Amino acid sequence: MKVRREDHWKPQSPVRKGGVVYPKYLDVHGFLGLWREALLAQKALLGLTKGYTNHPQLIRFKCTTDPVLYVGSYLYYVYVEGLARGYHLDKSKIIKYDLTIRLPVTEGQVNYEFKHLLKKLKKETLRSTNN
């Protein structure tokens, strides 16, 4: 089944990271960081990490009926974006996914993630200009 990148991303704003920034808006470093963070979230939700288990970005996955399924579904669409970019991500790392579910995102989550992203971008810009 062919899946379009936009099929999963139906937000009211262009922001979606860890579930809240559209992956297509991220540069290569941001995108690969997103992939790694989402895999870490999956691991944490499976109880396979010592840290990260109470990270704020996990809350919305934990509030679902099946957190591992929801984070896996999110990872799948990140994977699809990676394919569109020509990246070779390992789909086998996704434990399970369902292409019919949608992860709800609150306005507060969008605002939090947007501010967090701006801080990261500012740091990265400062680091880039100092090198």
Image: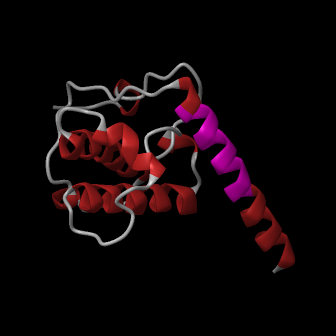
Q: Is residue 20 left or right of residue 71?
A: right
Residue 37's x, y, as percent? 41, 59
Picture residue at 52% right of the left edge, 37% below the top: 16
Total numbered circles = 0
Picture residue at 32% right of the left edge, 59% below the top: 39
Residue 110's x, y, as percent? 57, 33
Residue 125's x, y, as percent? 78, 63
Q: Residue furthest top?
A: 12
Q: Residue furthest right?
A: 130
| Dominant SS type (magenta) | helix
- 114 inside magenta stretch: yes
Region in magenta: 109-121
Which residue is nearer to you in this view: 54 or 28? Answer: 54
Q: Residue furthest front?
A: 54
Quadrant position of residue 25: top right
Residue 48 makes an appearance in the image: yes
Q: Is residue 93 left or right of residue 4?
A: left
Q: Quadrant of the N terminus?
A: top left
**Model colouring:** secondary structure
Instruction: Using the image, determine if residue 71 lies above or below residue 37.
Output: above
- 18 inside magenta stretch: no
Which residue is nearer to you in this view: 15 or 64? Answer: 64
Quadrant position of residue 42: bottom left
Residue 103's x, y, as percent? 34, 29
Q: Is residue 58 left or right of residue 12?
A: left
